[in-house]
Amino acid sequence: MARSSGWLRSAEIGLPGGSGNFGGFSDPSISGGDVAFLGGPIRGEVVGIFIEMNGVLEKVIGVSDILDGKTIAQLFMGREALSGNQLAFRASFTNGGGNGIFIATVPEPSTALLIGCGLCVLVGWRPSCRNAVIGS
């Protein structure tokens, strides 16, 4: 979702990969022109950490995702969590799985697009040997 830089208003922003819009977000962390934040469909309910990088909004990680072999119960992030394309956050896990501090490296949207295009080219290209002459 591309948009010009400016004020983020929850009622106008759709949840990436989900249905509906954000009901609220909190704890924004800004680095350069990029912003990461905790958000969810209901005000006060955090379902994930999201990032808007180069005008593209994406989910970084969410509650119920698997991380380090454990299911995430809660996510926490500070206001200085984002530095370039690295994002520090704390996750607590279900069933007494403890908690930990993690760093996510978020690829730039243009990098992900280039990788995707490169894979499409590789998958679509197949060498043809039907008419090859072997030997002399």
Image (cartoon, grey):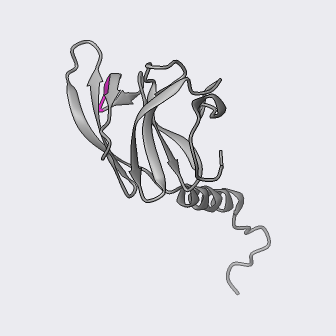
- Give the extent of the magenta segment: 68-72
Residue farthest toward the bottom in the current orientation of the protein: 136
Residue farthest toward the right in the current orientation of the protein: 131
Q: Nearer the viewer, residue 60 or 52?
A: 52
- What is the quadrant of the N terminus in the image? top right
- Dominant secondary structure, magenta: strand
Quadrant hosting residue 119: bottom right
Q: Nearer the viewer, residue 58 or 132?
A: 58
Q: Nearer the viewer, residue 24 or 126?
A: 24
Image coordinates of residue 25 in percent, x first then y, are 47, 30
Image coordinates of residue 57 in percent, x first then y, are 56, 44
Quadrant hosting residue 64: top left
- Tell me if 15 is positioned left or right of 129 in this view: left
Image coordinates of residue 53 in percent, x first then y, are 51, 52
Q: Is residue 89 above or below residue 118?
A: above
Image coordinates of residue 91 in percent, x first then y, are 29, 29
- Tell me if 100 is positioned left or right of 78 in this view: left
Q: Is residue 69 magenta?
A: yes
